[in-house]
Amino acid sequence: MIGDAEEFVNDYMARISVAPDEKELEQVRLALFGSNGALTSLIKEIPTLPKDQRGERGRQLNGIKQQLEAAIAARLGELRGARLADIVETEAIDITFPGPPLGRGYIHVLTQVRRQIETVLESLGYQVELGPEVETEWYNFEALNLTEGHPARENWDSFYFTPELLLRAHTSPVQIRAMQRIKEPPIYIITPGRCYRRDAPEATRLPYFSQVEGLAIDKALTVGDMKGTLLYMIQSLYGKERKVRVRPSYFPFTEPSFEFDVTCGICNGTGCKSCRHKGWLEVGGCGMVHPQVLRNGGIDPAEWNGYAWGFGIERMAMLKHDIDDIRLFYESDLRFLEQF
Amino acid sequence: MKISYEWLGDFVDLADVSPKDAAEVLTRLGLEVESLTLVDLSQIVVGKVLEQQKHPKSRNDLWVHQVDLGGGRVQQIIAGAPNAVPGTLVPVALPGTTVPNGKVVKDMNIAGYKASGMLCSAEELLLGDDHSGILILDSGTPGEPLTSVIPNHAVMEIEVTSNRPDCMGHLGVARELAAGLDRPLKRDFMPSFTGTANPPGREVIKVTIEDPDLCSRYIGGVIKGVKVGPSPAWLQRRLRACGVRPINNIVDVTNYVLLEYAQPLHVFDLARLEGAEIQARRARDGEKLLCLDGIVRELNSGMLVIADAKRPVAIAGVIGGEETAVTDGTTDVLLEAATFNGPSIRQTARALGLRTEASARFERGLPPELALAGARRAAGLIAELAGGSVHRDWPDVYPRPQEPVRVRLKPWLVDEVLGAHVPLQDAEAILIRLGFHVKVLGDGEWDVLPPVFRLDVTIPEDLVEEVGRVFGYDRVPPTLPGRRHDRWTPLVPSIDRRLDAAREVMAGAGFTETWNPALVSGRKLEALRVAAYAMRVSNALSDEMDTLRTSLLPSLVAAVALNRDRGRDEVRIYEIASSFLARVGEKNSQPEEPLRLAAVATAGTTADSGRAAFYALKAVLGGCLEALSAPPCTYQRGAAELFHPGRCAAVTLEGRQLGYLGELHPTVGASLKVEGRLVAFEIDVEPVLALSRIPRAQPLPRFPAVERDLAVVVEEHVTAGSLLAAIKESAGDLLENARAFDEYHGGQVPEGHKSIAFTLTFRSPERTLTDAEVDKVMTEIKSTLEKRHQARFRA
């Protein structure tokens, strides 16, 4: 029987070593270790042997079992390795072939820009305040020192429903409403929203547009604080190499009043065709809140002062993305909207 | 407004200040120079026309000139205007030259005639807008550069803010520039009076103001014995540079003073006024006036006119009358310098659709003191340029003289507001340069008297601005405010940022966000029958945008149509914006402005494709609400104007209706020529956000689930929703989830019936369920469905 054993082992070792694939190897394994397998049968015979032979026979078969199992495991490793090697060798694909259309939708570029502005100013502690788009004459004009017959009113030519009711020409009414609601400064708010002015549609302006205004009311605020806030905002949105300048201007609701400009992103302020050789691009208006406006909002100008600024979201988006026609924002042409 | 750099030089020394530098200083002071045109005439030469003949061959009207260019050189030059007659001096641009307006001159041959150079018009030399003829020079020597007659110059286009009417003339601009450059202004504001002739002017003409609210001052200067003729070249040139056409010396002086002082003036031919009388009064309804521009205008009582004893002779502050205008034969004139009410002038100019140089200034509210300065300056110039004598003691009707406004300034306010240190003596010097009087009081405060032409300065902050802008805001360092606060408001995410969660779902589902105008066509809303609560603008720009939208859907459908037109077949879009719903019976109340989320998607043309698109969109809406952390909403059959009556669901969240989901009514798409079906939803989002809750973590299940499918055959009218309700009710605690996944007609399903397939998921939190337990529940469910909905079951 011992001599048979050697032959038995050699025979199966040979079959293991030539098994061409994992399936054949599994057949060999079953032929040995399956419930009717050759080795299983031999092991099953042990109890029929005379008692004194059982121990040695058991050890012998156990040795054979371990040897063959190890051989199968080794062969399995070889075969698997070869198969995986074959997979990576033969299955190269054309990686330049495009993926199928994702069919994703796009978020409007004005939403994206508005989101950036909100995020930047929230980081300075400003909160978003909203107000109605259909406003009363008092909130839209009177409370902001734009009294009836004021020569500056021509810049805020508005759409009226009744002599008392109109589409807001700016988001400034929200500032008054916020002062009245919050009552006690400090007040740091921004007021994004849609506005309306009676301007015929053209490439640079529309009768409807979106604004963000900011308002800070606190103790002892300065023009310097306003400049710093604008600079922080602009650099956060457009990059830290940008500069901001304020130019004296006139608004009835601020004193002093300014326009604020940003260095042109194309020439970095040296002057080029796109900034009409000025080096600066006009962005918006700003100023120190007029004492009467504070009073109209119920805030005592002897104790508090403030600054405010405003600009068009469209203008910011146009500067950021080189958009040359404001009408594109409101046309809903997917060929435009899918660019951002 | 056009400002001539050379003219500014009359008032402030600009020898060492280039036009570009001057423009920079003005911009920084708040007078924004929008453009600067430099006119370089050094390449243009003076020529003298020797001969002129009509071009014999050309079909166009052309004239062939022989032009003496000095030194015995004569060139043949062809021009299209006939006014360069022999003997005139003209500006000549020789071949190779680029004239100031950018035209390049070349040697040419026109129908057989050589043309070597160009005779220039004022417009080509940027000396004015006149391109009707060749500019005729009144002096010069052939061959010498044009600059020996007309110096190089520059014109700035300046935007003057509405609070500074005093800067709508060269003197005001020069005062700013002088302050910005810290050098003296060479001219006093108030010229001296030159009237000498008798009798006193007020004996020659009687002036009355009927309505002092509309006319606060009227000066009528009588000047007799003038000789009307052309103005001198320098004056004409300055007018042209500012875009004003010279007419005659009298009219030109009034325009000149307007451009210098910003005070509009008018002159009447005294002989043509009836009754030696001037009234400033409201027009009578129906009165007419033949104006200087040749147009007869009908007037009404809202307009102020200047009238003689019989009739209106001018529309106050806007335009004069033709019948009393100065002509070549005029010898005696009445010079009007008045102050009119700004809003009234604006209203009149608007009503007439006529905005003139005069009305543009008056409507900003001119100081009455300016009228006197303008009258004196003009009277002096007329006497100088047209001869004549100014009668002394002219009528100056000024019923309520301007009260001086004094401003108390705590000078340290300047530093406090600016956030930079301005030495007191610098601040004082700045105010003085700008014409303010500063008196330092014992307590250190300043008593400041603004100049008479600065009605805009009334509060201390105005003075801070004056100091700040001359000091230079560039010198104010940027800082961020930062105080120790004992009170703050915690950050609340904005509504728009909260809605970003819905935007993410929409984007993932292939929907692109749009922003559409809120002003739409009221007519179209009516056609769609959604105009019931619409608010109509009373002064719309066009009927395409005369009404506030009551729903976002018509805009979205229009956007679908636009994209279809531009070649896009499949369109999925949405918008987040307010709709506007008038409050019935409250004309002056602000409307409701519900913030809405609305979406529209295209579907195929078949009923089935519309149905499939409906369910797909329902899933998108459900996804949005889930992303907003709102509880699930319910759907009931609904009816809304824009929707297909059989395919419309009212969307309800915790008892509150949010809006509708459905296929759009076929007429909606058809009205915009959109082929195929459209599905849409529109919901109010504020109630959704109000119900939004922070999701709480649930423990993960520890035992496996058992899934069973159930195909229920019921009559056509029984809804999946009612079956689901019955299933949930009868299943007890072990049912974790039930979902309808298929609806089937035909086959073994009898006529008038349908089969709905459900997947039911059972799970116990305590143990692994046995088949027997689940079977028992299934039996209970089936029995309930049988009883309640006469259901049968397919294997």
Image (cartoon, coloured by chain):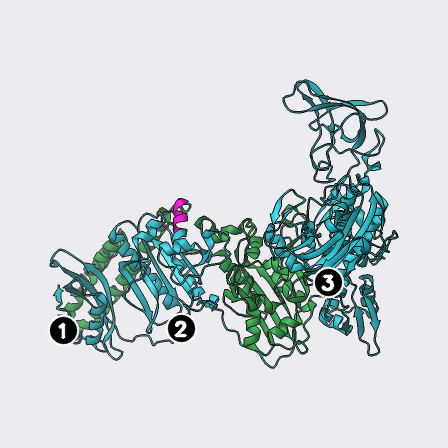
Q: Amino acid at mark 1?
A: Thr
Q: Amino acid at mark 2?
A: Ser
- Please identify, in this view, whether the residue under mark 3 or under mark 2 is nearer the observer: 3
Image disc number at residue B473 = 3
The hue used for chain B is: cyan
The residue segment tinted magenta is B559-570
Q: Is residue B447 above or below residue B756?
A: below
Residue B679 horizontal/vertical position (percent): 32, 56
Mark 2 burial class by Cα count in 10 Å: few <14, some 14-19, many 20+ = some
Image disc number at residue B217 = none
Residue B307 horizontal/vertical position (percent): 69, 53
Return the residue at label 2.
Answer: B692
Residue, far bottom = B486
Chain identifier, colour green: A
Image disc number at residue B779 = 1
Q: Nearer the viewer, residue B398 or B11?
A: B398
For disc 2, the chain is B
Q: Nearer the viewer, residue A17 or B71?
A: B71
